[in-house]
Image: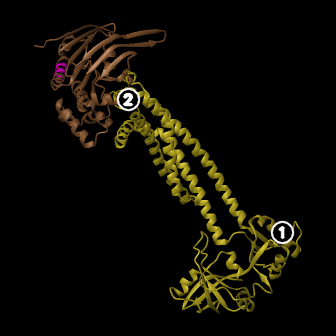
Chain colours: A yellow, B brown
Amino acid sequence: MLLIDLIYLSQKSLRSNILRSILTSLGIIIGVSSVITMISIGSGAREEVEKLIDRFGSNNLILRSQSSSSRGVSMGSNSINTLTLSDMENLKNELPAIKAIAPQVSLSTQILANNNNWLSSVTGTNNEYFELGNWSFETGRKFEEDELLSGKRVAIIGKTVQKNLFEENNPIDEIIRINKVPFTVIGILEAKGGTAWRDLDDTIVVPLKAAKQRLVGKKFPGDQIRSMTINVSSSDLLSKTEKDIDTVMRKLHKISANGNPDFVVRNFAQFLNARQESSKVMSILLATVAGISLIVGGIGIMNIMLVTVTERTKEIGVCMSVGAKKKDILYQFLIESLMISLIGGGIGIILGIGVVYGVSEYFNWKMKLDYISILLSFGFSSSIGIIFGFYPARKASNLNPIDALRYE
Amino acid sequence: MIEINDVSKEYIMGDNSLLALNKVSIKIDNGEFISIMGASGSGKSTLMNIIGCLDIPSSGNYNFNKKDISKFNSNQLAELRNNEIGFVFQNFNLLPRLSALENVTLPLMYSGKSPKNRNDLAIKALEEVGLKDRIHHRPNQLSGGQQQRVSIARAIAGTPNIILADEPTGALDSKTSSEIMKILKLLNNKKITIILVTHEQDIALYGERIINMKDGMIIEDKKNVIN
């Protein structure tokens, strides 16, 4: 018998019992949509974490100054800059796990060039900044050693700044005025794209010394800096180094172990881990739901197929009397259960895609529809149809023609 | 064509056993029209099921076209039913979800004929039983007589040598019955062997040879001269 005939006959009998077919596939529907949601949550979380790592670098700790509220008055996070370059040197000397440190001062200010003006954030730092932040150069170069030492007025600009000030023109060697101070553009950073909260490419990087002398002198007197990005040699040492930094900094700033610190250490990896962990829990939960509903769905299919075989015993006898072989009957019922499970799979896939889009739209939970999950769902539902449909189909095919024909 | 020697069929139900056929021997030639008669429980249906390869004898042997089919497996039996034998049942036994045409096509599907080829054959068969204008009706949209004609068309679609009709008029009124019997007679004129099981005398008289059965044995086997 041709496959197309088997499919034709199967859909005829499924359509004559359309409500029953759909109810039967309910387990598969729920199972498959859970599989899709589960995988989408997983890959959404993974993608987000990868993006974050790509943007902010991995194995980085951020140390920044924090207003102490020692006299009961909060001074606001920008009011006191307690971190200094000598803190940085001390940390580097005391903690061998630290691979590199990029000190930073920053301000937000008006930039003028080419008769355009643009408000952007300016960071004063050193060459480590590019490496730790995963920045690469589209054109141009990093700072030269003597430019850093002398605080030369050179600037490396992000893609957004380039577009807004220079449009399509080449900005290298052009002058931009930051806070009216002229800087020469020496490089362009490759675009990273936006995050939910800000455009990372809307940035200008200048030598730390140039920034301190020319741009933020009043705010950061002496060797004060705003923050530092600290790169740790391996991810295993992250939490330990975080604690060590706290200890060393308390010693340097003469703060007791239970006193209010004037700095804060942020462990980015920890934040990422927590995030990954919570999506993992969600995935496990959904995997359980998926597994249970697929099995229950499979048993449902088996149950209804057994009913169908009994109901249609006489019909099977008729088919055998006109020449149906055992395998014709077997395939007929297998295809029927396969179709039920594929209908369930199809509806489940649509439902799953709906859930994925709905949740990521309305709850702002990052999910990414993975096409593998659709393939996987098809695989799951068809194998369930075949596995759980096999027993009833075999039962049908093993009927004795005359017994089946006489069945009332 | 058909040669049955000393065939018995025993049904075992718990401690009791029932001998439905007791050492029956019969020879049927090509193109015969045979009526098998007998009261219910006489073994006539059992004999017919064995001839139709729906049931297997407990003992004895059965040669079909000089082949001993007691050694056939279920696939070979299915092929034999498909190619050589057409069944007509008392209750028509059409598949309710399929149209008349699809019902007639069913045996041709199982023999693996191409869609075009089998459609032509099925339409031809329906024409032969006079149902050309109702091929897309479903069984529940047809009268009893029409359903029985569809089932005859299904039986002849695969151009078999034998038609086995088990009480084909049992569910029909007398006028429709005679129409059906005329169709069977017509088919017999085309050299198709007809084996008819009935308990109605006037229906049996369509046959050229009448076999009477009682208690699993043939008690009479006579020629019937049709005027």
Question: Dividing the image into 4 quarters, which one contains the N terminus of chain A?
Answer: top left
Q: Is residue A269 above or below residue A376?
A: below
Q: Is residue B147 visible?
A: yes
Residue drawn at x 55%, y 38% is: A296
Give SS at disc 1: helix
Residue A316, numbered label: 2
In percent of width and height, residue A401 lies at 38, 25
Residue drawn at x 34%, y 9% is: B216
The subunit letter for the residue under badge 2 reads: A
**Comes first in the chain, label 2 or label 1:** 1
Amino acid type of disc 1? Asp
Amino acid type of disc 2? Ile
Q: Is residue B133 above or below residue B33?
A: below
In percent of width and height, residue A105 lies at 72, 81
Q: Which residue is mark 1?
A: A244
Question: Dividing the image into 4 quarters, which one contains the C terminus of chain A?
Answer: top left
Looking at the rendered structure, the number of numbered marks drawn on it comes to 2
Task: Residue B179: say if magenta.
Answer: yes
Specify the farthest residue to the front. B66
Task: Residue B216: say if magenta.
Answer: no
Crowding around mark 1 (Cα neighbors within 10 Å: few <14, some 14 to 19, many 20+) is some
Residue drawn at x 52%, y 56% is: A372
Which stretch appears magenta?
Answer: B176-182
